[in-house]
Image (cartoon, grey):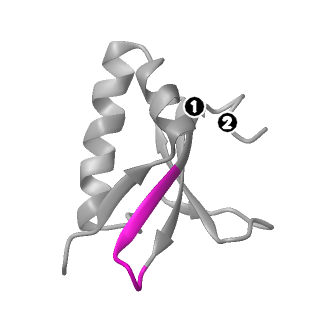
């Protein structure tokens, strides 16, 4: 399977930079895995979101993203603690 490009929104990049170092390392590892498989086991498609938004868990943190299968691109829209990220 071809690799996907992973792109972060400016706001998601800032959220990533603000994470504790240990969490940031784990999130970056998950982002690299997403490039190989944008729909890993454990991912969820969020209901009521347009365009279709997916999420993966990284401990108590969540990564929200949109997949463009035609362009082979994953757009990371938000990264944050589970209590804050869905607002």
Labelled pair 2, 1 in contact (Cβ < 8 Å): yes
Q: Residues within 10 Å of mark 2 (few under 14, many from 20)?
A: some
Relative height, residue 31 to residue 13 (above, below): below
Residue 69 spot, x, y in % from top left: 42, 81
Location of residue 71 (image quadrant): bottom left
The residue range painted magenta reads 69-76
Residue pointed to by mark 1: 80
Q: Residues within 10 Å of mark 1 (few under 14, many from 20)?
A: some
Q: Residue at x 41, y 68 (%)?
A: 39
Viewer-proximal residue among 21 and 58: 21
Q: Farthest residue toward the top? A: 20
Residue 24 spot, x, y in % from top left: 35, 25
Disc on the earlier residue, 2 or 1: 1
Residue 75 is inside the magenta segment:
yes
Left or right of 10 in this view: 21: left
Residue pointed to by mark 2: 85
Relative height, residue 40 to residue 10 (above, below): below
Residue 21 spot, x, y in % from top left: 33, 14
Q: Is residue 69 visible?
A: yes
Location of residue 33 (image quadrant): bottom left
């Amino acid at each position: 399977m071809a690799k996907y490009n992973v792109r972060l929104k400016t706001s998601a990049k800032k959220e990533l930079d603000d994470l504790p170092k240990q969490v940031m390392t784990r999130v970056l590892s998950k982002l690299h895995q997403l490039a190989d498989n944008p729909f890993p086991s454990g991912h969820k498609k969020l209901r009521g979101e347009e365009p279709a938004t997916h999420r993966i868990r990284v401990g108590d943190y969540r990564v929200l993203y949109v997949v463009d299968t035609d362009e082979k691109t994953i757009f990371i829209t938000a990264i944050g603690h589970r209590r804050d990220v869905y607002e």
